[in-house]
Amino acid sequence: MRAIVGRRRVMLPVVILIVLAAGGGAWAATRSSGSASTTATSLVAVTSQTLRQAVTASGTIEPASEANLSFSVSGTVISVPASVGAAVAKGAVLATVGSADLAAAVSSAQANLAAANLGLSAASSATATQLAAAQAQVLAAQDKLAAAQQSLAAATLTSPIAGTVAAVSIAVGDQVGNSSSGASSGGLSSGSAAGAGGSNGTGSAGSSGVGTASTNTAQIVVISTGSWVVDASVGSADLAQVKKGLQVEISPTGSTAKVFGVVSSVGIVASSANGGTATFPVSVAVTGQPSGLYAGGSASVTIIVKQLQNVLTVPTEAVHTVGGQTVVYERSGGKQINVPVTVGAVFGPNTQIMTGTKAGDEVVVSRPTGVRGGVPTRGQNGGGTAGNGAGGNGTGAGFGGGFGRGGTG
């Protein structure tokens, strides 16, 4: 009995030391394994494709033309044929005011002109001074008649463009006063709207994207729905690349179909500076008459600043510099060889190859696949298992190979 107890006192420290050693070996193996990384190697064919560099931005869809109309004469509104959403042709009557007083003014001006002409005829044998005075009276009467006729015409508000009525803010019985009307081009919030009232009560159209924005006090607004623009903005870092005439892909929000356009103008004065970053206005003219576009809708635009068609390319990761020479790796006879190449433009993940390879050649691409980690397993790095010794249970420390050395019974 004493012998057995004494034996236990001798063996216990040994067991503790062995377990600690095994644990230390496992910790070291796990740490080493956790920091290892792996790469995956593949062969990728040299291909011929189109490469392009683009600037992306967001913008707002606007009608290419907009007429902001108001009566340029005073009177009472007697009819409003226009209604929101109605399609109208150029010259269509939108609203009218009572014209009895205006018609009477025309008749009076006509009578005054007739009298002036009679006076001029009677002064044909008068002195030069009397003749000049008679001629001046005729000219003044003609001007008054023209003004009266223009005012009478302005009692009828007509559309200067073909499009759709977007807003109507007058009704029959309203009193209207003198104001000028204008038609603008280049969107709801841009374009010149400062034209003087014409014979039909509307002003002249302004140039796209130029001038002061029209006010929102128009009595009737007509917008074009067959032609559109996108008002976008780009940052200062991209401004130098964006030029008039560049092709643009437009993706309206909520639509899977793309439409296309051309950069029509590029602003050189920053429109905003949010967070210290200036943005510059870019106007894009939409090509054709695509459907599904709505004034005020948002869209993302992709401006193609550079494009190369049918060029040889390889993944950028396949290009290396060896001994000061640009090369790609190819496989030949089971070996990896360096093939000198001349590269052209780099478009992100793709690089243009000018010389050195041809379409169909396969180049080696190595990509990291991440860090290998986890708990070591038997047969790899880690602690071994205890062996069974003859005559009793043995214990032993594991080694890197994954096998334990058994103790003696």
Image: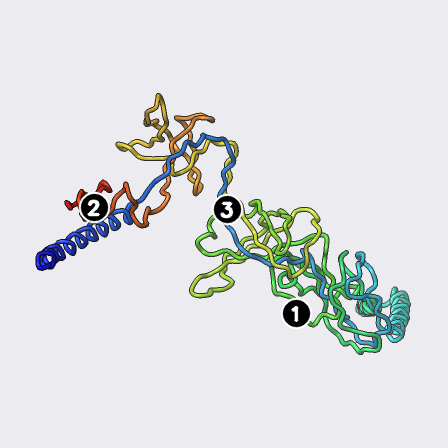
Point out the tag, 2 or 1, that comes first from the N-terminus. 1
Q: Quadrant of residue 218?
A: bottom right
- Tag shown at residue 215: 1
The nearer-to-camera label among 2 and 1 is 2
Could you tell me residue 337's position as x and y percent?
32, 26
Q: CA distance from mark 3 to mark 1?
A: 35 Å
- For the residue pair 18 and 35, the one nearer the viewer reads as 18
Q: Could you tell me the amino acid type at mark 2?
A: Gly
Of 264 and 288, nearer the camera is: 288
Name the residue at 37% across, 29% down: 341
Q: Which mark is residue 54?
A: 3
Res 333 seen here? yes
Query: Residue sitting at 33 percent across and 42 percent down?
Result: 38
Query: Quick check: marks 3 and 1 in contact, CB under 8 Å?
Result: no
Q: Residue at point 12% right, 57% down? A: 8
Q: Amino acid at mark 3?
A: Ala
